[in-house]
Image (cartoon, rainbow, N blue to C red):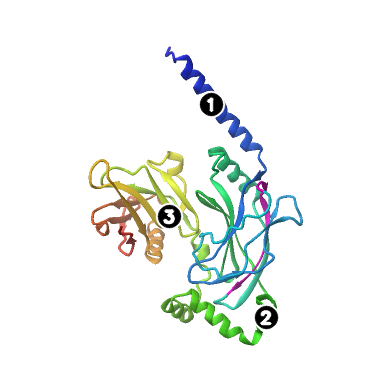
Amino acid sequence: MVKFPLKKSINFLLIFFAGSSLMANARELTEFNWLATESAPADYPMQIMRGGSFRYHGAENDGLYIPSGGTLYQGWGNAISTHAVGPALKPLPDKLDITFYSYLEDVFYQGSFDLPYAKILSLFREGVAVDANSPVYNRVMVGIAPGGTVAVWVSGKKTVEVFFGKAHKADLSWGKVMNYPENERAEFVKRRQEEAVEPEVLAAIRKNGIHFNQWANFRTQYQWVPTFIAGKTPKHTNVVYFNGENDRLLLPLEESVAADTRPVPMRLSFNSLMKGETEADVFIIHFDEAETFAAFAKLGSKQESLHFEFEPKLPKSATKVRLCNGKESIQLTKWTIEEW
């Protein structure tokens, strides 16, 4: 039998019981330190109107207001405002009330939604159990997009979608809601569009229309894992997905994590030792939406397991990126990489 020094044994027991106590306490928590924030896709300016809120679980008329006003276009899943209001610890939401305006459609939307409280509570509890001093989650974020699309994420060190739905068109008085003269509506809307969207992108949207299903399509998931075929496997990779989620994947992946499905990546970053054993180069790769989704749809159409292969090189632009399903592969060429 292996014998451990008494001091080490006592330290181990203290750590074990502290961890067990933390897990037990986290399972009992119902109030957390969190803030409300908002998001909207790039190139599709939106605005949240006053009065929107996340309603606290079990409270019919009490909740945390959602920041409103201003034109939103900073990117799907990118948090914009954070207003430090309300008590430090507060219940999580189980309902969402929201009214918003889509500038490219010149349309108001309105909706009241039931949120998956049990899922939100579970995620926040897990986040506290990981680190009580700096929990994984500290925001509840609402995303709004054309066509009435509404998403809700919990976010912080990672971002996880917990709700996706549709608001309905609302017949509201534009002048009263926007607090602007009705006879200047067309010029006001045109000016806001041009401030938020690059001219060539705006021209293309006006010509081809809005693809209203794109935010739902972003949620399509595949069983894929990152694979590195040159040099040492990184310790982790940070992934931002098109559906607004983001995560840090520890490598090599545990079997259960490798078996998970996940959305299509929009950006992926990792460190690779290219100049020896100590100096690591940072690779941050941005994927082309059309090319990447087409590759995943073709190779993963029958729920095949996919390997997203990276062969890092210097200069970084010489890096090779391939998607494989065991039978065939597609080399991606339209991605870009940050050079610094």
Q: Identify the residue under disc 3.
A: 302
Picture coordinates of residue 110 (x, y %)? Answer: 67, 68
Which numbered disc, 1 or 3, marks the residue closer to the eye? 1
Residues under labels 1 and 3: Cα distance?
44 Å
Q: Is residue 282 visible?
A: yes
- Residue 19 within the segment the image draws in magenta: no
For the residue pair 334 and 301, the one nearer the viewer reads as 334
The reply to whether the C-beta atoms of the residues labelled 2 and 3 are less than 8 Å apart is no
Q: Amino acid at mark 1?
A: Phe
The local crowd at label 1, few if under 14, some if 14 to 19, many if 20 or more residues have their Cα within 10 Å, is: few
Q: Are marks 2 and 1 in contact (CB under 8 Å)?
A: no
Q: Amino acid at mark 3?
A: Lys
In the picture of the structure, the residue carrying the numbered disc 2 is 175
Report helix, strand or loop for mark 3: loop
The correct choice, above or below, for 222 with respect to 333 in the image is above
Disc 2 residue type (three-letter): Gly
User: Which residue has dot 1 on it?
Assistant: 16
The residue positioned 42% from the left and 46% from the top of the image is: 249
Q: Which residues are magenta?
A: 88-102
